[in-house]
Image: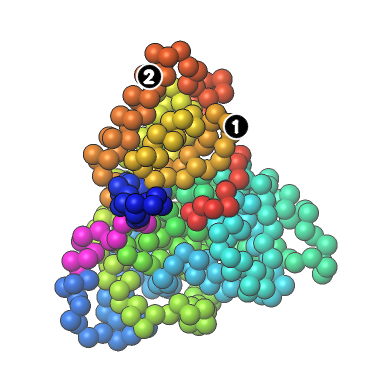
Amino acid sequence: MRDASMNGAIEKPKYSFLDDYSEGAHPTLLEALIASNGSQQTGYGNDGYSAEAKRNIRAHLGCGDDVGVFFVPSGTSANAISIAACLRPHEAVVAASTGHIVTRETGAVEASGHKIINVPPVNGKLTPATISKALDDNWHFPHMAKPRLVYISNATEVGTVYTKEELAAIKTLCETKRLLLFMDGARIGAALTSTKNDLTLADVLQLTDIFWIGGTKNGALLGEAVVVKDAALARDFEFYVKQHGSLLAKSRIMGVEFAELFRGTLYFDLARRGNLAAEALSRTIVGAGFALRAETETNQVFAVLPVQLVEELQREFVFYVWEKCDEDWAVVRLLTTWATDAAQLDKFQQTVLRWADKSQDQGRRHVSGEGDTIVDVMFDTPEDVPL
C-alpha cells in the first residue's frame, strides 16, 4: 500500500482485525484442492467431492438424503436464493433492522420482488414479541405484503447467539402463524462453538425450515452450504440456484472444501479458535478498564475505547470504527479468526494495557460511561462496514 505523501514511500503493512475473511483457506483445504486438481469430475455439483461433502454434512446433521444440501459461492447468494425459493411474489420477510439482508446486500431480496419488514433487534436478535408486533402492524390484506418468512442470523450482526430456548420459541410462533423460519449461518460455526451456545447443528435443522452453513468466514476460500429440510422446497431449489447465476460449473471446489471441513470436527475447531482469540481480546480490554458495547459471545468484539487509543492502535492495526460516541470515545469492532496470529494479538493487547497504564499515571478517566463492563447494545450498523 502506498503512502499518500509526496515521496511515495511504501506504507508499513498493518495487521487486520477488520473481518473474518481476509485470509485465504485453511491449509488442509488447500492441500485437498491440490490433491484433487487432476481429477476429472462432472460439473454443476454432480461431482464426487460434492456428493461426499453432502454425506459428511448430513452425518453431522443426523439426517438422511431427504434433506437437501446445496452449495453456493457467497452469503448474499445464499440469502437471496433461499428467500426467493421460499416466497410467492406477494409475500414478505420479517428481519431485524440490523440484518445482513437489510443493510449489506444491495437490495438483493427486494430485487426479487419481496418486501422486508424491519424489526428493531433486542441484543441483536428477534423475539416472539417483536415478530408478533411486526405481524400485527402488517395485517391489512390484500393491501400490504403478507409476512411469510422470518429471517434471523446466528451469530447475529453484533456477535450474540440464539439459545435453544430462544430459537424454539421463535419456531413455535412461526408454526402457529404459518411462517417459515430461515437462519443465515454466515457465522454459524462461531455461534455453535460459543460458550453461550446450547444448540447443535442437528438442533438447528429441527428448529428451522431452511438455513445455511458458512464456509467463507470459517476456513474456506469461498462457499456456503444451504440446508433445505422441506422435500418439496428442496426438489426445485437447484433451479433457483441456477437462475441466480450461482450454479458453478466448477462446484467441485466447494465440494472438496466442505468434504474436508465436515470429515471430522475441523469446521468447529476453526471456529472455536476465532472465539478464543476474541475472548482473550475482551478480557484484556475489560481488564484495562474499558467497556464492551456488547458481550463477546463469538469472534466479534465491540469495545468502547478512547479516541486517542483508537488512533494509536490504528498505527499498527486495521479495524472498523463502528461509531463515535462523542469526541472522546468510539466503538470499534474487532474480528478474530482461525488464522489470527498470536503474536499480533498479544501486540494489540499490550498496546491497550500500556495506554491504560499511562492514562492512569496521568490521571485521565479511562472507563467509558459509569464503568459498566457492558453498555447498551442497541446500535445501528454503520454504512461503510461490509460485515
- Seen in the picture, residue 79 relative to 312 is either above or below; the reply is below
Q: Quadrant of residue 180?
A: bottom right
Q: Is residue 177 left or right of residue 165?
A: right
- Seen in the picture, residue 275 relative to 240 is either above or below; the reply is above
Residue 185 horizontal/vertical position (percent): 46, 57
Q: Amino acid at mark 1?
A: Asp
Q: Earlier in the sequence, mark 1 or mark 2?
A: 1
Residue 116 horizontal/vertical position (percent): 67, 62
Circle 2 sits on which residue?
A: 358
Quick check: can you spot residue 304? no
Q: Amino acid at mark 2?
A: Lys
Disc 1 element: loop
Q: Residue at x 39, y 80 (%)?
A: 248
Of residues 9 and 239, the one nearer the viewer is 9
Say few, some or many: other residues with alpha carbon within 10 Å of mark 2 (under 14 / 14 to 19 / 20 or more): few
Q: CA distance from mark 1 to mark 2?
A: 22 Å
Circle 1 sits on which residue?
A: 326
Is residue 148 shown in magenta?
Answer: no
Q: Residue at x 48, y 39 (%)?
A: 332
Magenta-highlighted residues? 20-32
